[in-house]
Amino acid sequence: MPGIASNRVAPPLYQRQSKERPRSEAKRGRIIEAAAKHFAEHGYHDARVGDIAVALGIAKGSIFQHFGSKDGLFFEVYKRAVRSFAKYLDAPIEVRQAGFFEVLRYWLTCTEHLVHEDWIPYRISLLGNYGTDMVLKREINRFLLSEDPYGTVSFVRYGLERGELRDDLDLEMMVSIIDWMVERFQDALLTAELDPGLFRRQGELAEKKEARIQQFLAMLQRAIGVVPASVAGARPRARGSHRQQS
């Protein structure tokens, strides 16, 4: 994710929008809401701007006037969807008090429930991550890096302040690891409900999903978590450390 968009010279036309008037902003909101449902139902590539315009009873050109292109429309739909998600530290206080990895467990366990509450933004998120072309994907990556919509930076700092995370890793590296690994794993959980077959595993029993979550958290904790002194002392010494000094 970091660095993908670093070579762009100028932003796409759909990012260079003038400030909207109140009535125009309200119309944009209606278009985005209708487009979100349409994209979620049909996917990015099969969605048609003309069909969205017909559903709204407006001219197709009116949508292009507001968003510039189909890419521009989806980009705004994606940003609204992602901004609607809770941040890591929005977990209940008793979960936060239990620690960094318990917060992760909470959100991973809640994934299926959240999808059933409102499937459209999660479907849009999956489409943005896996179902768009590279130009649009680059803009999505830039947005995620600049806005940090999930509050990953604050979440990593929270883990560091609690002494649960390694302090020998760069903060940005820690944030990237969370963004890459946790979001990818959660996407795999989401596709069991929204896009069966996109990932290898699908249709798993609840017990199997819980076991996978536990294995994932254990792996992540070994990678970025502080190793207890008792465990660190039990690790085998590096090759050659047993040699006697002369």
Image: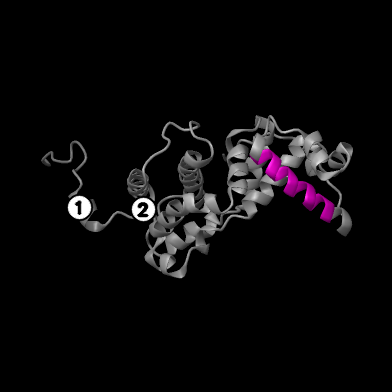
**Residue 117 sits above or below residue 197 on the image:** below
Residue 82, given in percent of the width and then of the height, sits at 62, 50
Towards the viewer: 158 or 206: 206
Is residue 119 covered in magenta? no
Apparent side of residue 195 relative to residue 82 in the rendered image (left or right): left
Quarter where residue 52 is shown: top right
Where does the magenta region start and end?
Answer: 26-40
Task: Provide the secondary structure element on which disc 1 rests.
Answer: helix
Q: Amino acid at mark 2?
A: Gly
Q: Quadrant of the C terminus?
A: top left
Camera-nearest label, 1 or 2: 2
Is residue 27 covered in magenta? yes
Apparent side of residue 147 relative to residue 226 in the rendered image (left or right): right
Q: Quadrant of the N terminus?
A: top right
Q: Amino acid at mark 1?
A: Gly
Residue 224 is tagged as: none
Quarter where residue 41 is shown: top right
Q: Main secondary structure of the magenta part?
A: helix
Residue 225 is tagged as: 2
Q: Residue at x 73, y 43 (%)?
A: 35
**Residue 195 sits above or below residue 83 on the image:** above
Task: Provide the secondary structure element on which disc 2 rests.
Answer: loop
Residue 174, given in percent of the width and then of the height, sits at 47, 49
Say whether residue 21 is visible. no
CA distance for labels 1 and 2: 16 Å
Towards the viewer: 200 or 216: 200
Quarter where residue 204 is shown: top left
> Mark 1 — residue?
233
Residue 173, given in percent of the width and then of the height, sits at 49, 47
Q: Residue at x 49, y 53 (%)?
A: 113
